[in-house]
Image: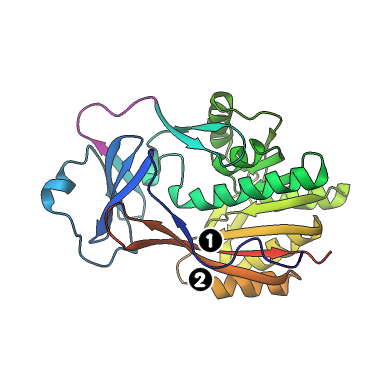
Amino acid sequence: AMGEPLVDGDLVARPSPGYELLDSGGGRKLERIAGVLVDRPSPQAIWRKRLGADAWSAAVATVVRTKDGGGYWTHRGAEPADLWLRWAAPHGGELALRLRFTSFGHCGAFFEQDPVWQLLNTAVAGLRAQLGQAPKTVNLFAYTGAASLAMATAGAEVFHVDSAKGVLTWGKESEAASALGEGRVRWIHDDARSFLAHSARKGFRYRLILADPPSWGHGADKETWDFDEQVQILAEECRAVLEPAGRLLLTAHTPGVQRRALANVLATAGFVDPGCGELAVAHRDDPRLLPAGIYACGTVAS
């Protein structure tokens, strides 16, 4: 049934050798990232912490929130250098993702996306077998490209689109250290919507699109992005460049927007029976799930 959504229901990231969520609460989360114990903000964590102060005070890297909503890292001792996350793809080779502690308390990968990487990797492997050639896929607002590499190692030709040059260079470091086999990534410095407009003009068509738009932002040529105002037209522009039976996976982290709202956006854009759910991260030793965004997924009628 080609109308079936790629996925429906919650997508939960489980602890892995490279990433563990140890505790959360009091507006913070305690994580072990590539072996480094990290304490950083988590606005959703409105409950009380479970672990004691001693567990939390063992963190060697901490993000301090600033009044403007940003944040900066403080390190006990030297800042950890040469950090890599190894990610074993279900299909294809092992990925090596370069991590760095950057502004806003980021580190170069969003670990709640792990089930998204697995899903896309598996979908591409299926498409490659079905089509007998590399499916063309797109990653919009693609950041450092973990999802791009997850699709490439399963045999896709991936168009990785981001308006920040720095993250493209960063992504290429991970690409060089990863086993991609036949797959390939095209690193494209462009605004997501201008890439889609260009694709539509040229008649290019894709099999699978991932879009992870921010709440707001600026494009390569000072275009502005506002999630609430533009997500509907973004979904329609994606729909216009997808092949019959092509799929869109849209993830979001915009406060106040719920998963059904995203599903309605996809249905309005002409996708068949979209699925939707929450993204969440499982803790290492307790059953709580830390909410980490939402997604909707839709298929073009074939």
- Using a 10 Å C-alpha cutoff, classify the residue at mark 2 as few (fewer than 14 neighbours), some (14 to 19) or many (20 or more): some
Asked if residue 297 is among those painted magenta in the image, a careful observer would answer: no
User: On the picture, is 39 further left or further right than 172?
Assistant: left
Residue bounds of the magenta highlight? 74-82
Observer-nearest of 26 and 277: 277
Residue type indicated by callout 1: Ala
Q: Residue at 38% of width from left, 46% of height from top?
A: 104
- Label for residue 257? 2
* Picture coordinates of residue 202, whole percent (x, y): 87, 47
Is residue 155 something that shows in the picture? yes
Residue type indicated by callout 2: Val
Tell whether label 1 touches label 2 (CB within 8 Å): yes
User: On the picture, is 41 further left or further right than 86?
Assistant: left
User: On the picture, is 54 further left or further right than 297?
Assistant: left
* Picture coordinates of residue 247, whole percent (x, y): 72, 58
* Picture coordinates of residue 145, whole percent (x, y): 57, 40
- Label for residue 163? none
Q: Which residue is mark 1?
A: 252
